[in-house]
Each structure stands twice: as C-alpha cells, then as structure tokens.
Image: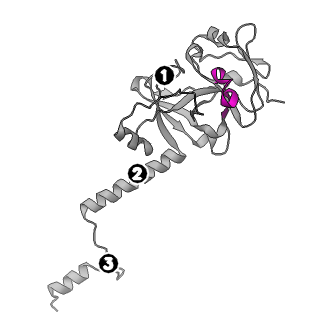
C-alpha cells in the first residue's frame, strides 16, 4: 500500500490519541507569553512572599547600612503579628520621610520595582520595641529602655548612651507598634513623632514584612538583624 504525501502530512498532524496536534506558536509569541508569565509570577511573589528594598539612610546602622539591598519576607505575618525585636519595613504613615522625599530610582527601575525586580525605596525600616499593650519607658538608671518594667540590653545598638537622648513613657495601643532605629542618635522614629498624627505609633497594617536577609553588597550578605533575645524576659502586658 502506498501512502500519499497528503496522507502522511495528515498523519503527522494527528497525535497518538487521535486528536489533531496543536500548531506551535511563533517564536516571538512564545517569548512574549513567557515574559508575561514571568512578570505575573514576580508580582505574586512580591505581593505574598518576598520583596526587595534598599536602605537609603544610616538609621539602622550597624545592623543595616546605607545602600544595603535587603529581602523582606511576608510569610511570618500571614497569620501572626510583628514581635518585639523584629526588624520591619513599613509604609510611611504620612510625614516620617519628610516632604519632598523621592526614592532614588529612574523610570525603568520604577517599572521593575512594581514587579519586585528592583529594590524599592519610599518606605522605612525600624526595629519593633513595643507591641499592643506594652508600656515602653526611657530610661532606667543605666540609660536602658524598659518594656513592661523589664530593662532591655540591646546588643544591636552601636551607641547605647544615645538611647536616653529622648525621654518618653508610652503605652502602645492595640494594633499599633512602637518602632526605633538601632542608630539611636541618628534615627527619626517613634520618639520624634509623638506630637504628630498617630502619636508616633505605627499600625500593624502598615507593616509590609520582616527584614530577612541582606543580599547586596556580597561582603555583607546574611541576616537582616531581627533579634528577639533581648526581650525574652519581658512579660505580656497585663
């Protein structure tokens, strides 16, 4: 039996299951499809899992330094709230960055940042000192913070004496946080905004995630500095 070229072509276009085989997409269409899928996946990762940020100031030195690139993970707060000692990134509540602040990124970088492909600015990073219900006081006779009556030794603070530069005695409202930078002498944090909207407290809803790792520069790659140990003996507010 002789098979014609036409029959052979029809046979090749039919799969073993008897269904016609799908025609392959042109290369340019396939490339566009792959790019779209990659961008959608990147957007999902940024929204729910991990997001990149850059550090524009020295308020968290020496834990985080100027121009560090960090990854912030969001999984920890899917079902829980920030804890004392967490280093968190949060949305500016309105005036912490100051009028006229602009993230150092060009148009292309801003587009990439939408998909989590470029470290973004325009947010703040601080350490959680007090959570809802906590009484935070500065300071004891040795210049240390007190949380619910317990004095805190903070190994991540480069100049502990600077902690006592601003005195305060606050009770953190439920659903709010009291945040401070590690570089106490150079950090405009909750202490500096007690007279502003929110009284210096930040809503837990404003927190984007927990600082996870430093990824750049490579010589500083590693943990982003969350430390719960100093708060281990702090009792829950009662």
Q: Determine if residue 226 is in view.
A: no
The residue beneath circle 2 is 39
- Residue at disc 2, secondary structure: helix
Residues at marks 2 and 1, CA–CA distance in whole angstroms: 30 Å
Q: Earlier in the sequence, mark 2 or mark 1?
A: 2
Give yes or no for residue 192 being in the magenta stretch. yes
Specify the farthest residue to the front: 99
The residue beneath circle 1 is 57
- Residue at disc 1, secondary structure: loop
Tag in front: 1 or 3:
1
Location of the N terminus (image quadrant):
bottom left
Residue 14 found in image quarter: bottom left
Relative height, residue 59 to residue 118 (above, below)? above
Magenta residues (range)? 190-202
Percent x, y for residue 94? Answer: 58, 33
Label drawn at residue 15: 3
């Amino acid at each position: 039996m002789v098979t014609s070229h036409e029959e052979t072509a029809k046979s090749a276009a039919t799969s073993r299951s008897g269904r016609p085989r799908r025609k392959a997409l042109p290369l340019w269409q396939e490339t566009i499809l792959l790019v779209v899928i990659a961008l959608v996946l990147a957007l999902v990762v940024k929204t729910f899992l991990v997001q990149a940020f850059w550090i524009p100031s020295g308020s968290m030195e020496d834990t985080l330094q100027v121009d560090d690139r960090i990854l912030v993970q969001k999984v920890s707060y899917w079902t829980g709230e920030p804890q004392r000692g967490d280093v968190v990134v949060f949305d500016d509540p309105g005036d912490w960055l100051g009028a006229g602040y602009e993230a150092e990124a060009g148009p292309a970088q801003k587009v990439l940042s939408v998909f989590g492909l470029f470290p973004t600015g325009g947010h703040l990073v601080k350490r959680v000192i007090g959570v809802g219900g906590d009484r935070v006081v500065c300071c004891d006779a040795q210049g240390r913070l007190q949380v619910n009556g317990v004095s805190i030794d903070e190994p991540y603070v480069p100049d502990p004496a600077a902690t006592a530069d601003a005195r305060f005695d606050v009770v953190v409202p439920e659903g709010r946080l009291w945040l401070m930078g590690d570089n106490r002498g150079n950090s405009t944090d909750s202490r500096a905004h007690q007279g502003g909207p929110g009284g210096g407290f930040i809503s837990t809803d404003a927190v984007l995630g927990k600082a996870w790792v430093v990824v750049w520069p490579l010589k500083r790659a590693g943990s982003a500095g969350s430390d719960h140990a100093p708060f281990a003996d702090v009792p829950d507010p009662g």
